[in-house]
Image (cartoon, coloured by chain):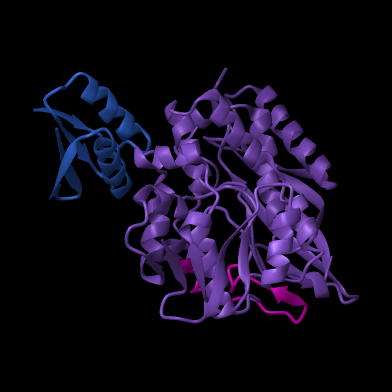
Amino acid sequence: MVRLTHTVKTSGCASKLPVGDLNAILSTIPPMEDEKLLVGFETSDDALCWDLGDGRVMVQSVDFFPPVADEPYDYGRIAAANALSDIYAMGARPAVAMNIMCFCSHMDLEVMRDILLGAQETCRQAGCVIAGGHTIADATIKFGLSVTGFTTRDRLWTNRGARAGDLIVLTKRIGVGVANTMIKAGEADAGFTREVLDGMMELNRSACELASSFEVHAATDITGFSLLGHLYEMAHSSGLTIEIDSSAVPVYPQALEGARFGFIPQGAYSNRDYLEDKVLIDEGIDRALCDLFFDPQTSGPLALAMDPASAEDFVSRFSGVGAVIGRCLPEREKAIVVRA
Amino acid sequence: MKRIDTSGYSCPEPVLMTKRALKSSGQGLEVIVDNVASRENVTRFAQATGYSVGCVSEGSRWILTLTK
């Protein structure tokens, strides 16, 4: 059987273009404006938000990437969970989705069917309907979804509402990019491989739904731009500094070992390069742990800014891996500070 | 000292090439890398397995010298 991850150079969200290159181009394109457009691309948020005028807001996003798992069904499930996550990160519920597929003409069509079935299963779990899509022939496989969801204006989360004094909550472990590099290299055992795949398939639905019962000031999901990259966007958009307690961040222990042995995706170095002058990291923090902070995640956690009481309450009630990893401070010289 | 050239390969291949080469080379190893990720990853792998790493830049690539 073809191992899908061996047909591509980069996997999952580690395949994103370097953010510096992307910003250099996007900054030259004037953003389109409309009074109904509540969130466009200028604040690097997770989805566009469109005011429907009756209190409801439509939230729309698209996400696709090369294979991140060897089994087509697993890949379809992960790609769907990752695409749906953008909707959850805005505090919305996904409603409808369309497939986006690039497929190789020489590959068995059963592979395509299993990818689509995997995505359908995950969307079913999310209560989201896939209805159609688009497929083109390409040299390597890529798959994802365009997802539309809905929320209300008073429940819409963006990455720009964090307040000084808020705590930052994370809802999954990080280290998936390193883990995927280890898997590709044959350096991850079966148990760890399964744990990482299951983690990427896990929807951010329960985190979103539980958090919706609290007042969330800002939210994002952690994907290709890494933990520090996405928190930088939140800090920058909100006009403050986020201080992270490095010892509080939940990581896959085996990924920490993998980083120590150099199984780090290229994207982690691009992220570090872009963020270098925006982040202050205390001396004495384990280099491998810092590597995971720049590691591109696929279908990663939500990061939520909430007042301290809500954050603590959320973590105590959340059934998954939930942790308070930092706090928001009035703006300082650096947008992100990582403490030992 | 044995030398391998990882130019043109992307991660994790340069680390795996280094790992294989070190198994058959007890005397240390020179590794040519042509991008920052490979340079950093091969350095991390070598250090984690007990080697000292020297690095010399040569045009658009680097020569890493791994010794115990």
Q: State yes or no: residue A35 in magenta.
A: yes
Q: Position of residue A195 (x, y in %)?
A: 60, 33
The span picked out in magenta is A23-44
Q: Is residue A76 left or right of residue A58?
A: left
Q: State yes or no: residue A61 in magenta.
A: no
Nearer to the camera, A48 or A33: A48
Nearer to the camera, A330 or A63: A330
Q: Position of residue B42 (x, y in %)?
A: 27, 39
Chain with purple colouring: A
Q: Position of residue A33 (x, y in %)?
A: 68, 79
Q: Is residue A265 left or right of residue B26?
A: right
Q: Is residue A155 left or right of residue A160?
A: right
Image quarter of the N terminus of chain A: top right
Seen as rendered, the residue at the extreme left is B1
Image quarter of the C terminus of chain A: bottom left
User: Does residue A158 appear in the picture of this structure?
Assistant: yes
User: Does residue A24 appear in the picture of this structure?
Assistant: no
* Quarter holding residue A274: bottom left
Which hue is chain B drawn in? blue
Q: Give the dominant element type of the magenta stretch: helix, strand or loop.
A: loop
Q: Residue at position x 82%, y 64% from top?
A: A213
